[in-house]
Amino acid sequence: MISKLILAWKNHYNHDWVPVGKLSYADNKYFFEYTESAKKFYREGQFAPFSHMIKVDEHYESEELFPIFKNRLLPKSRPEYNNYLNWLKLSEGNVSPISELARSGGIRATDDLQLFPYPEQKNGNYEVTFFSHGIRYLPPSYIERLNNLRVGDKLYIMSDLQNDYDSHALVFRTNDPVEIVGYAPRFFSFDFNTLIRINNPENIFVKVEQVNCNAPSQFRLLCKLTTLWPSNFKPFKDSVFD
């Protein structure tokens, strides 16, 4: 069960995405703390702390979900709520605030924040479920192939070595014919590259979890990556997550 999320923020000064906080849930309480990156950008005048959590060196806890995250949950009264849960491959019986935010990313059109689940070891495996990114930039022929994918179909990983925005960028593709169906979320790409190097490419498995043809592009293709959890491996070990 997911209990920790990484909060990423888009820096308007250089348009880079930066991890700025960690949200966690344990013992019926929510906890939040800022990263060292958030503190650095705050001191430089580029990052503003969130309402009700204005001291970047504090550790916050609450029995209720903090407002900035609560506002990212879709109200059950919305007419599209059931469709939304189906897109996320969740149901009213197994959805929690943390699981919804982990799957949806808590994305809002009015700001530049996004949440990512903190992977946990399951039966000796590294396993994480996520939506393929960058689909809105794909040409129509690739979108058509994506829409025809089926649950359980295998996807393949390619390194995008000359990507100007992410030196660790990874692309997902189909096989025969080879067509791109999106990118790995950037905050997983460092870990994915590490796991590929340690476990070797043939032991990295990416499969289609669900295709939502009528959903917005950010909820179109749900994927799962599975591989062995190496000894001494820790997720998000890149220094930007400190």
Image (spheres, grey):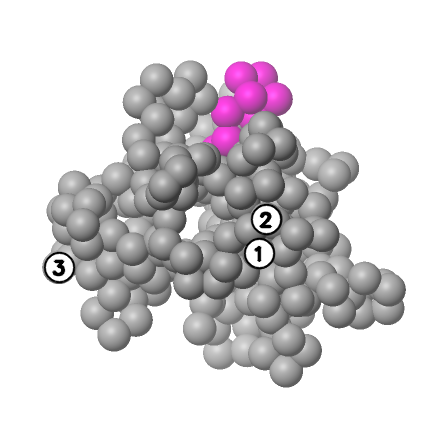
Q: Nearer the viewer, residue 139 or 35?
A: 139
Task: Decide: is 215 above or below 49.
Answer: below
Residue at image point 76% right, 37% down: 110
Which label belongs to residue 196? none
Separation (CA) of disc 3 from disc 2? 38 Å
Say if residue 189 shows up in the picture. Answer: no
Which label belongs to residue 211? 1
Residue type at mark 3: give it.
Ser
Separation (CA) of disc 1 from disc 2? 7 Å
According to the picture, the residue beneath numbered tag 2 turns out to be 147
Q: Nearer the viewer, residue 25 or 113?
A: 113
Are the residues at dot 1 and dot 2 in contact (C-beta closer than 8 Å)? yes
Residue type at mark 1: give it.
Val
Residue farthest along the front direction in this orientation = 176
Task: Identify the mark nearer the N-term, 1 or 2.
Answer: 2
Task: Decide: is 191 above or below 38.
Answer: below
Report the side of 16 relative to 54 (left or right): left
For the record, the magenta segment spans 7-18
Residue at image point 59% right, 78% down: 94
Task: Decide: is 80 above or below 56.
Answer: below
Are the residues at dot 3 and dot 2 in contact (C-beta closer than 8 Å)? no
Residue type at mark 2: give it.
Asn
- Could you classify mark 3 by the number of other residues whose Cα lies within 10 Å: few (under 14), some (14-19), or many (20 or more)? few
